[in-house]
Image: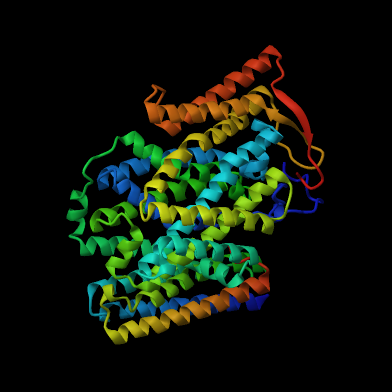
């Protein structure tokens, strides 16, 4: 039971860090469109992780359902924004410098794949359906 | 209320004919997210495109806000009934329409419109594929609609988990994508000044747009109980519904209208492609349509089970899928990329579906509470009338009144077809039922005893 809580906290922290990295890359994109994209997607990841982390932290470890639901909601949004980086980082409209675009693209994939893994693991271990 | 089925087996799945047990209830935020997922379809943006052909941006916002405020109130009232009774739409309609009447109501509200929605979304899928890969016989709108519809039907039939998960994580970014598309369109086409000065050749009357907006989601209002019945609080569904429709539906309509006004493209998919957001974004749009359409098929199948009590969900998925796919392919072949059928569909919905919700509101909030002093109860052995005649009469009279008001300008209370349809249905239902009740005239025909399966 403690494992679910610590796994959820670790997963959200990872999302927070990766989101913060993409935020930090915003000024380096080389074009205001790319900057706004990173500020927007990264901002959503950082915001949602920062809001949900203390909620999960303050819940009792034994209350797995009340931990799983907010954790999955947060991971859902972060993972989705990761998908956003995957499909938009290299799009011509944003004119992002190639090395930054590829960095965002790779971080997007990490967020997407880890997010999927974490969502499925929490769902499987707690019995909370994905559609939370 | 709602505990009577604790020991009854859920034969059809998803508590199709039973009330929701307490342990299955979900938070208000969860209910809100479900509503947001349902709203995340390209059709909502296309609806904005429809408004752009009628209004300038500021009038679009006004029309969208008025229409959506009406949807918030109307849907919110119905959502509360679901939260209170924990029963779905087809069940609560047994009181204002009777058991057979509820089947007729289900036909009007879900069973037939959802087939049309499936066809519309399949048609939009064909358009999207045609935009991404033009010039091949298999990617013509008609052909893509045909194979796309059949693929959607197959995935719904087999229930591929991978697609369900992808759809699940697509929803939040889908909203981000629309925001990005909006700002990109503004960025590339002259900024906000250009947006505020853009306008169609002629401005349509306000009433037409409000009816259009209301009609777009009127069907959704009437079936809000299907989701709100899961709400942990009685009001969970009402609050979630109100916020999502008033804030987010308005934003989606405005974003769709803006993209169309700025890019001069009546097709939002084409607009996104022109902006240069990449093929990945378009594929996401496809995925959103694909999975939403799976849901349309499943919901339609649920409605048909409630109407017929025959065949299973998968068999209904195949039947409805084939019908919807053929409609979509013909639509694509006959109309090409015109939005006209979609707009007509939105306006048409505004006539006969809201009256079903109106009689439900009248029965639950007024007749049952103050006149008959009864509670809505469900469970094996519960007795319902076969047909509640005033309910059926009020639904059709209200729909007809709304159609007359909009089509021929018949002077009715508001001049807005959908609102008139609701007012006429609500007042007529109350007048007939209270009048008959006071006069001692029996207005409910026959008796239907609920079976152990809940049917």
The image shows residue A6, relative to residue A63, as above or below, that is below
Q: Name the quarter where the N terminus of chain A is drawn.
A: bottom right
Residue furthest bottom in the image = A99
| Left or right of residue B145: residue B20 | right
Camera-nearest residue between A17 and A42: A42
The image shows residue B214, relative to residue B358, as above or below, that is below
Report whether residue A42 is seen.
no
Report whether residue A112 is seen.
yes
Q: Quadrant of residue B406?
A: top left
Percent position (x, y) of residue A33?
A: 26, 71
Camera-nearest residue between A83 and B243: A83
Q: At x 18% / y 55%, what residue is drawn? A: B194
Q: At x 44% / y 74%, what residue is drawn? A: A83
Q: Name the quarter where the C terminus of chain A is drawn.
A: bottom right
Percent position (x, y) of residue B63?
A: 33, 41
Q: At x 35% / y 52%, what residue is drawn? A: B338
Percent position (x, y) of residue B306?
A: 69, 45
The image shows residue B211, relative to residue A23, as above or below, that is above
Percent position (x, y) of residue B229?
A: 63, 47
Camera-nearest residue between B134 and B54: B134
């Amino acid at each position: 039971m403690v494992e679910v809580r610590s796994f959820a906290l670790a997963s959200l922290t990872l999302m927070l860090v990766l989101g913060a990295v993409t935020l930090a890359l915003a000024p380096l994109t080389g074009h205001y469109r790319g900057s706004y994209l990173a500020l927007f997607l990264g901002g959503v990841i950082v915001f949602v992780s920062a809001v949900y982390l203390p909620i999960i932290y303050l819940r009792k470890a034994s209350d797995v359902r009340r931990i799983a639901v907010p954790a999955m909601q947060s991971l859902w949004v972060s993972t989705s924004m990761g998908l956003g980086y995957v499909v938009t980082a290299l799009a011509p409209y944003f004119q992002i410098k190639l090395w930054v675009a590829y960095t965002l693209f790779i971080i997007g994939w990490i967020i997407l794949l880890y997010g999927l893994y974490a969502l499925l693991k929490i769902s499987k271990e707690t019995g909370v359906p994905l559609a939370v | 209320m709602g505990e009577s089925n604790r020991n009854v087996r859920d034969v059809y799945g998803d508590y199709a004919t039973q009330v929701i047990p307490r342990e299955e209830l979900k938070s208000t935020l969860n209910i809100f997210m479900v509503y947001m997922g349902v709203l995340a379809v390209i059709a909502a943006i296309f609806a904005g495109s429809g408004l752009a052909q009628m209004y300038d941006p500021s009038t679009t916002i006004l029309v969208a806000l008025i229409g959506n405020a009406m949807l918030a109130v109307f849907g919110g009232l119905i959502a509360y009934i679901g939260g209170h009774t924990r029963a779905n739409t087809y069940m609560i309609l047994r009181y204002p329409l009777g058991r057979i009447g509820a089947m007729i109501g289900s036909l009007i509200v879900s069973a037939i419109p959802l087939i049309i929605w499936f066809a519309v979304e399949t048609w939009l899928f064909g358009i999207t594929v045609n935009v991404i890969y033009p010039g091949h016989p298999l990617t013509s709108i008609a052909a893509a609609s045909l194979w796309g519809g059949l693929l959607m039907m197959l995935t719904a039939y087999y229930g591929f988990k991978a697609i369900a998960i992808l759809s699940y994580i697509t929803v939040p970014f889908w909203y981000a994508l629309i925001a990005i598309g909006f700002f990109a369109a503004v960025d590339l086409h002259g900024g906000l000044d250009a947006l505020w000065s853009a306008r169609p050749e002629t401005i349509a009357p306000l009433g037409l747009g409000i009816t259009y907006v209301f009609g777009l989601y009127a069907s959704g209002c009437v079936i809000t109980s299907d989701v709100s019945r899961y709400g942990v609080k009685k009001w969970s569904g009402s609050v979630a519904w109100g916020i999502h429709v008033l804030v987010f539906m308005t934003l989606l309509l405005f974003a769709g209208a803006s993209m169309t006004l700025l890019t001069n493209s009546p097709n939002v998919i084409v607009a996104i492609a022109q902006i240069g957001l990449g093929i990945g974004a378009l594929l996401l749009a496809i995925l959103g349509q694909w999975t939403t359409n799976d849901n349309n098929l499943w919901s339609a199948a649920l409605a048909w089970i409630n109407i017929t009590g025959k065949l299973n969900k998968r068999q209904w998925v195949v039947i409805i899928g084939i019908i919807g796919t053929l409609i979509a392919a013909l639509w694509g072949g006959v109309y090409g990329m015109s939005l006209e059928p979609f707009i007509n569909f939105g306006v048409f919905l505004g006539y006969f579906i809201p009256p079903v919700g109106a009689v439900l509101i009248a029965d639950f909030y007024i007749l049952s509470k103050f006149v008959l002093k009864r509670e809505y109860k469900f469970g094996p052995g519960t007795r319902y009338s076969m047909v509640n005649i005033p309910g059926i009469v009020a639904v059709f009279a209200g729909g007809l009144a709304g159609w007359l008001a909009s089509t021929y300008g018949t002077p009715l209370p508001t001049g807005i077809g959908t609102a008139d349809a609701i007012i006429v249905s609500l007042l007529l239902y109350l007048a007939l039922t209270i009048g008959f009740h006071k006069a001692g005239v029996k207005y409910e025909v026959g008796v239907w005893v609920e079976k152990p399966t809940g049917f």
